[in-house]
Amino acid sequence: MSVPTRRTAVALAVTALAGPLAGCGEARQVAARAHRRPARGDALRIGLLLPENQTARYERFDRPLIERRVAELTGGRARVVYANAKQDAALQNQQIETMLTHRVHVLVLDAVDARAVAGAVRRAKDAGVPVLAYDRLAEGPVAAYTSFDNEEVGRVQGEALLRALGDRARTGRIVMLNGSVTDPNAAVYKRGAHRALDGRVGIGREFDVQEWKPEHAHSHMRSALTALGKDRVIGVYCANDGMAGGVVQALKGAGVSPLPPVTGQDAELAAVQRIVAGEQYMSVYKPYARAARAAADLAVALARGEPVTAPAAVDSATARGVPAVLLPVVALTRDRVADTVLKDGLHSRDEVCTARYAAACDRLDLPG
């Protein structure tokens, strides 16, 4: 599968979100421009299509944050029509058709399968409904794309793993567990990770994990330990937190002690708890509020028929120069829990520091 290529923006087909990203400035720019030149007013119908509900972020953060920002921009007069595909690409295509039938003004699409959704994206464009690719770059004629800098995600994970290994990087092998081949982001994470890891540590086994499922990661980790020997695995590159949970279970089940450093992504609550306890070395923290805000701003502007700009552009397998907002990420290790996920309210101390993790939290002196 072709993967999105990042390029600098030179001449974009859309022109309203100009300038560098410096916090919330990009959101204010879009909102201000859209309010100056309303094409449809605020009685908008915005279709929001998220890919699955196994990963906590989509229902807990992405959906409510986007809904809240849309309400702010439209005085509560816009309606967000929501659907979750539960990891079923065919179902997501049906959901798009339903939303087009109900005449939404824009689609915010986080694709289950970037390639399989391309035809539906084309039909949306033919119907005059722009598609904003959110989180994952769908194929087809999308109007714009907003996500985190996904190649940087993989690079940050790889660099963090190397820091954890130190001189041990020359003494053993790591296992790489990448995301699903149906997710275009997975290939970009992998590319960024290889940029960091190749030539600096031996890769003993590497897997693309079907549907990102923890149980598949668990199975792959067990087979890697059998093939390489549990004493020879010095670290695990794991593309997200759900799979990291399966990896940690496999390592514990095989009697590996101490646990090698394991990476992750998404700063899920269970992962933060594992990080606090020293069972998972790091995750990647993505400020979801910024991503949701950028997506809502772009969606409202597109729904109103406003021209919008973005500070970058990316290429997919089927489109070149897609206007893009790419947000930075943070390597979340034990020493960053307080000033990232707790400070930003992603998780509270009470949520993280349950009875099982209270002593570890106290050792880190996490604020209440």
Image (cartoon, grey):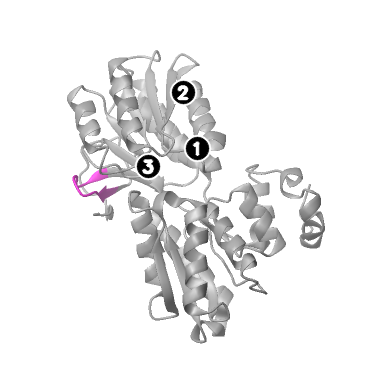
- Point out the tag, 3 or 1, that comes first from the N-terminus: 1
Give the quarter of the image for residue 186.
bottom left
Q: Is residue 251 magenta?
A: no
Q: At 60% from the left edge and 62% from the top edge, which residue is drawn?
A: 248
**Of the pair 9 and 19, the residue shown nearer to us:** 9
**Of the pair 231 and 169, the residue shown nearer to us:** 231
Give the quarter of the image for residue 42.
top left
* Magenta residues (range): 313-322
What amino acid type is highlighted by mark number 1? Asn
Q: Position of residue 184 (x, y in %)?
A: 32, 50
Q: Which residue is mark 2?
A: 73
Q: Residues within 10 Å of mark 3 (few under 14, many from 20)?
A: many
Q: Which residue is mark 1?
A: 53
Q: Nearer the viewer, mark 3 or mark 1?
A: 1
Q: Which mark is residue 153?
A: none
Q: Nearer the viewer, mark 2 or mark 1?
A: 1
Q: At 23% from the left edge and 38% from the top edge, which residue is drawn?
A: 118
